[in-house]
Amino acid sequence: EPPTVARIQEQLVTRTAEELRGLRLPEPAQLVTYSLFTGPGEPLGIRIVYLSDHDVSSDALELIVEDIRQRVAIADARVVLVRVNATLEPLVFARNSAVVTPAIAATLDIAGQSISEYPMLRGTVTGGGEPGEHAGIADERTEAIVSYLVEKWHVPGDVVTRSATDQPPRTTTLTISVAVFGKS
């Protein structure tokens, strides 16, 4: 009896996972995940999602695409690389305020969408404050950011690490990392 479409798909996914195991990207890029896609009359597509502050260079991209095609033994595989930004622009709060403004929310939405879409991503929020601001403002800012991500994007609270400093500048940062074997 011929194999079912479901069985063929399962074999393809399993074989691809085995072939892509150990795929390395140029530093500082980190592999987040990959997915397969196809369309009528189209070659197999492989979407590689990676975390980095910069796009991989065109030379590196060519090498990665060729490496993936050789690994899966499909010379015309369509390989697409998608970058998730690791460091977002600083979140600037008004003096003595922990209010998430529309500008801050726009940046948090980028992070929230990425962390929601790729559950292996983790966030680190470092709240900042300046001398003369009220005590605890850095913690308030950090909690405001985490609350926003939890409420709007349903990001589990334990996915975001919190730290705070009452040292200048008044900016607060949010960085994203890839969890490896359950660690961030």
Image (cartoon, grey):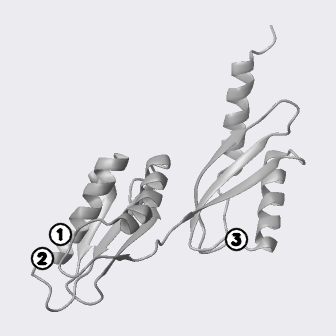
Q: Is residue 110 left or right of residue 145?
A: right
Q: Position of residue 142 (x, y in %)?
A: 24, 68
Q: Position of residue 143 (x, y in %)?
A: 21, 63
Task: Evaluate whether residue 184 shows in this view.
Answer: no
Determine whether the residue tagged by mark 2 lies in a helix, strand or loop. Answer: loop
Amino acid bearing label 1:
Glu
In primary-sequence order, the first of circles 3 and 2 is: 3
Q: Is residue 67 left or right of residue 132?
A: right
Answer yes or no: do the residues labelled 3 and 1 have beta carbons within 8 Å?
Answer: no
- Which image quadrant: the N terminus? top right
Answer yes or no: do the residues labelled 1 and 2 have beta carbons within 8 Å?
Answer: yes
Q: Position of residue 33 (x, y in %)?
A: 58, 51
Q: CA distance from mark 1 to mark 2?
A: 6 Å
Q: Nearer the viewer, residue 8 or 165?
A: 165
Q: Which class describes the residues within 10 Å of circle 2: few (<14), some (14-19), or many (20+)? A: some
Q: Position of residue 47 (x, y in %)?
A: 69, 49
Write down the residue under mark 1.
Answer: 140
Q: Which class describes the residues within 10 Å of circle 3: few (<14), some (14-19), or many (20+)? A: many
Nearer to us of marks 3 and 1 is 1
Determine whether the residue tagged by mark 1 lies in a helix, strand or loop. Answer: helix
Please give the count of numbered marks on the rendered protein.
3
Write down the residue under mark 2.
Answer: 136
Q: Which mark is residue 56?
A: 3
